[in-house]
Image: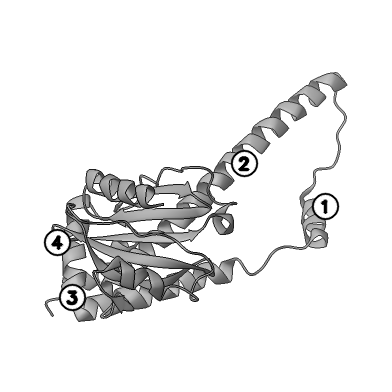
Amino acid sequence: MVCESWKTKLDTYLDGELPEQEMRTFDVHVRSCQSCSADAVTRLQMKRSIQGAGKRFTPSADFRKRVQHSIALKPQRSFLPAWVFAATAAVVLVVGVLTLTYSGTRSGQDQVYSEIADLHVATLASSSPVDVISTDRHTVKPWFQGKIPFAFNLPELQNSEFSLLGGRMTYLDQTPGAHLIYDVRKHHISVFVFQERSLATQLKGNALASEKLPFNMETWSQGGLRYFVIGDTSTADLDNLAKLFKAAS
């Protein structure tokens, strides 16, 4: 019964719609409660399955033509000069293209960021968040060889506040990648590494993370790889860890 009040807010929590302080409190509870963490993982998996199912159907060209034909307006006589319609149509077309381009880029970026946040939450809620447990980068890095189609470097953490907990394989839109987990002052930070070309259509350059996320995030592209650093710690901590990775690469 203690968890009933938490479970009623679980969907809102996973959608990142709780107030910031309540999100942080919920984070702590999910990590310590096996029942709520199991429910969180189950719902995240269902959410990703629904998202994947929604992408499986793409309307054919013939279907589009039939829909457009069925809703097309019949031509009507007009007393306005033809050039007025031409100019208006040109303006509408340009605005529409720009809007669709911007919206498509933003929606693609936001979906990637949302999936990264889901992976971060699901991993921390898991009873076994890492597949290779080690604080030694020379143990963790070789573990990924042969499991993912690229290589990457891990930073030296000596004289820093960060400690490495271990790593695991992960997938983003069916693309394999590496997931590293670090600690700083009892806060968990996830570092994801994927091949840049696999995310080229969703992200451009050194994109900034969405402000809608319940976590802080930093992302950048370097050496053909795309890095994501995400956690509930401060942006300064994330930036410091990102700098260590950039120096190591």
Evaluate if marks 2 and 3 touch, with contact meaning CB atoms under 8 Å apart. Answer: no
CA gap, disc 2 and disc 4: 41 Å
CA gap, disc 3 and disc 1: 52 Å
Q: Residue 101 carries which label?
A: 2
Question: Which secondary structure, mark 3?
Answer: helix
Question: Which residue is at the front of the view, 131 or 69?
Answer: 131
Evaluate if marks 2 and 4 touch, with contact meaning CB atoms under 8 Å apart. Answer: no
CA gap, disc 1 and disc 4: 60 Å
Q: Residue 59 carries which label?
A: none
Residue at image position (84%, 20%) is 83
Residue underneath mark 4: 186
Q: Residues within 10 Å of mark 4 (few under 14, many from 20)?
A: few
Evaluate if marks 1 and 4 touch, with contact meaning CB atoms under 8 Å apart. Answer: no
Q: Which amino acid does label 2 sit on?
A: Thr
Residue underneath mark 3: 4
Q: What residue type is labelled 1?
A: His
* Label located before the other in sequence (4 or 3): 3
CA gap, disc 2 and disc 3: 44 Å
CA gap, disc 4 and disc 3: 27 Å
Question: Which secondary structure, mark 4?
Answer: loop
* Label located before the other in sequence (1 or 4): 1
* Label located before the other in sequence (2 or 4): 2
The quadrant holding residue 162 is bottom left
Question: Which secondary structure, mark 1?
Answer: helix
Q: What residue type is labelled 3?
A: Glu
Q: Which mark is residue 69?
A: 1
Whole-percent x, y for residue 18 in the image = 25, 55
* Label located before the other in sequence (3 or 1): 3
